[in-house]
Image (tube, rainbow, N blue to C red):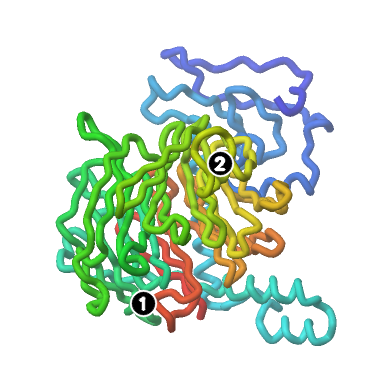
Amino acid sequence: MRGKCAEAGWPAFAQGRSGIVSTVQLTLRHNPGTAQSPQDSAQRDDEAPSTSSSAAGSSSAPDLPGFYFDPEKKRYFRLLPGHNNCNPLTRESIQQKEMESKRLKLLEDEDRQKKKVARMGFNASSLLQKSQLGFLNTTNYCRLAQELRLSCMQRQRVQIQSSDPSALASDRFNLILADTNSDRLFTVNDVKVGGSKYGIISLHGLKTPSPKVRMFENLYFTNRKVNSVCWASLSHLDSHILLCLMGLAETPGCATLLPASLFVNNHPAIDRPGMLCSFRIPGAWSCAWSLNIQANHCFSTGLSRRVLLTNVVTGHRQSYGTNSDVLAQQFALLAPLLFNGCRSGEIFAIDLRASNQGKGWKATRLLHNSAVTSVQILQEEDSLMASDMSGKIKLWDLRTSKCLMQFEGHVNEYAYLPLHVHEEEGILVAVGQDCYTRIWSLHDGHLLRTIPSPYPAAKADIPSVAFSSRLGGFRGAPGLLMAVRQDLYCFSYS
């Protein structure tokens, strides 16, 4: 209880025939100790919907255990258990209602933004004028100009063309992953009958004002869960897709290399029928492909208490024992290092030059307070971005093992959510468990934009996104792709 209850006695509760108290109106004298300051109230309004600790906390009335205060009706309602009621009033349903109300308001604000483009006094000419007059230093000018570009990104629904239109109407996007040149998307779709199927979307037609893309599919289908996906460069850049599949019943888990040419021959000069192979790997949580010359044609899989390094050509394997499940991985490009994020919160690097015997192969060790879900190495390879299941996103200095910056606002409690770092644009993108897509500045950690999902927040409807400085290929513009349910949306710089 945040504040003391009024000194007056508790009023009698009106009970129905069933003995369940449905509503109660309490008359309380305000205690000065329970009043919120305007600063606290403003801070609470800025928080993400799912980060509020209780529904009653949004009002100035005391928080009573087992009761919810409706600020509109100015009444207390008892939170009913959900097992014996047709329409139970629970804390979860109240929070969900508040989240949906905030989402609809943000969508309405975005629709207004399309009409006025930018808020009053926040446009390119005014920023340039203030910078020339000396009212803005270089750092603030760059950040505000970046915020202006991001705020002007408008949501457009992308038309997807396919040989099977009926499948597009029923299959739901589970994951999208852009290749290095951002002219292709690999997709994992949940099919209506159960299981998953794969596809590749060509982004060459992704141009305003009416963006269109082409979906290429094949007969590959799995009834097993896809734990992790990454592009693999076996015969040439992004020639294959590496997938980690969970085991099912008596079928063991595996890591599979699928040639991209199986989906579409969109690069006829270089895409020839490639190697299709599968490696029996039980219980792989994560995977990563190596572009480092000292681990050529190798990929890594994160298992339960083990990291397995596999050479695709020779079949040679090297195992490294860990103390926890490895949920996230990435190879460094310049140094022969493999970074791993664990369920225990530990982040460590494996020196690929050292033997897997003894302790000499651990090169770096960082620590989060919760399970690490994503690790991203920055281009200079002197820093690393990591996120965890407590919603923390931290930028680490790999030379000193110290946290340089923390990015506030991300929401996560248990989901496996990736990070998207784009140093060319100077931004960090992440989708939270509350289904909001947030964009931060890499330079100062400032939250630049929060994009609501087009659909109500749900565990099964967390959007999957891809951001690129050249969306659709070499001549493309910077932009964000968002896949949710059966829809694909484009947010591009205009």
Q: From the top left corner, tell me how far across and down residue 272 is, in percent.
A: 21, 70
- Comparing 113 with 476, the one in front is 476
> Of 342 and 456, which appears nearest the observer?
342
Q: Is residue 255 left or right of residue 363?
A: left
What's the distance in space between the residues labelled 2 and 1, CA to CA? 45 Å
What residue is at 22 percent from the left and 56 percent from the top?
276
Is label 2 in a helix, a strand or a loop?
loop
**Residue shown at 36% from the left, 27% from the top:** 86
Q: Is residue 245 above or below residue 452?
A: above
In this view, the mark in front (2 or 1): 2
Residue wearing tag 1: 206
Q: Earlier in the sequence, mark 2 or mark 1?
A: 1
Residue 438, quarter of the rendered image = bottom right
Q: Is residue 315 left or right of residue 65?
A: left
Q: Is residue 403 toward the left or the right of residue 471 in the image? A: right
Q: Residues within 10 Å of mark 1 (few under 14, many from 20)?
A: many
* Nearest the eye: 352 or 328: 352
Is disc 1 placed on a helix, strand or loop? Answer: loop
Q: Quadrant of residue 13?
A: top right
Residue type, label 1: Leu
Residue 430 visible in this rendered orientation of the protein: no
Q: Which residue is mark 2?
A: 361
**For the residue carrying disc 2, how many other residues have a C-alpha within 10 Å: few (<14), some (14-19), or many (20+)?**
some
The image position of residue 402, as x and y in percent, is 72, 47
What residue is shown at x 15% (from left), y 56% (from top)?
219
